[in-house]
Amino acid sequence: MRKGGSTSVPDEAETSAANSVTTSAKAGSPAADEVGHPPEARRVTRRAAAPPDLDDEGGAVFEVPFEAFFDAPAETSSDAPRETRRATQRDARHEESTPQADRFERTSTSRLSRNSRKTEASSKQRPERSLKGRALGYLSRREHSRAELSRKLMSFTENAGELEALLDALEREGWLSDARFAESVVYRRAARVGAGRIVSELKRHAVGDALIEEVNEQLRETELARARAVWQKKYGQLPETPAERARQARFLAARGFSMSIIGKILKGIEDSFGAE
């Protein structure tokens, strides 16, 4: 720089250097980085200084993540309370440290104790029924034979004499009757099966022989009509081949109808069946 009197005139070299620095700083060229402004800092400064977007009413518009509108699960959320996460981790470590057999033993023991408490509570609420009460409960549902009712009550008492005395009392009072039981069996079964099936059921329930013979005679009087109704509902057409005749005959025999009745229904094959 030249000095003359009280004023100084800059040299041409200094003027050109200053102009180049200013021009580089304005254009954002790498020359601006050499004077103390790195490109990263310049980009951050420009981004921070950029004005926010404005909506139609002049308000600022901010971008909100889509996930912010939904609550994240508690176990996966990073915003969960620190105490809750610590408690969960502590419980997990405790379960890992506890032997597996010990956990199973404590669980089964607690289950047994809970079941025992329920049993005690139910036993306190409902008193044990007497033997006669159980017998009347069975008889209120349907008719029973003496042998069937005795078999059901045998598991509730060890005194056979007491059980026989109870059955005698029920027969005297009209609660128990083999005759009514036989009538109920005939009423429920006669429309679908023959006399042979009904007689076998009465024998299985140890009904008296005299009563069984009486029921058998009554059923024989209507055996043909009942067998024809059963056959009509199942087939309704006479067999045309020997195989069809045998199939229909087996069906009626399985229902408990006699061979003579089957021969009368399936006309033309009476000779292949022997009379009873």
Image: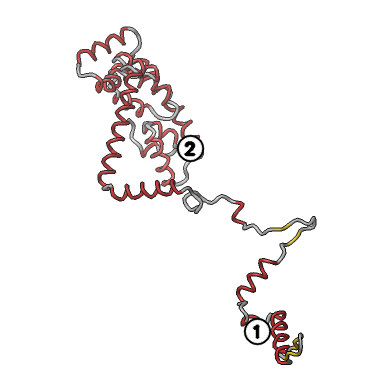
Q: Quadrant of residue 250?
A: top left
Q: Quadrant of the N terminus?
A: bottom right
Q: Relative to 197, is 68 on the left or the right?
A: right
User: Given this view, does label 2 or label 1 mark the residue nearer the observer?
Assistant: 1
Estimate how packed mark 2 is, as few (under 14), some (14 to 19) or many (20 or more) residues with alpha carbons within 10 Å: few
Q: Quadrant of residue 143?
A: top left
Which is more toward the observer, 76 or 25? Answer: 25
From the top left corner, tell me how far across and down residue 196 is, in percent: 35, 28
* Disc assigned to residue 31: 1
Which is more toward the observer, 218 or 10? Answer: 10
Pointer 2 with pointer 1, Cβ within 8 A: no
Point 26% across, 22% down: residue: 151
Q: Quadrant of residue 268?
A: top left
Point 45% across, 47% down: residue: 241
From the top left corner, tell me how far across and down residue 243 is, in percent: 41, 47
Q: Which residue is mark 2?
A: 234
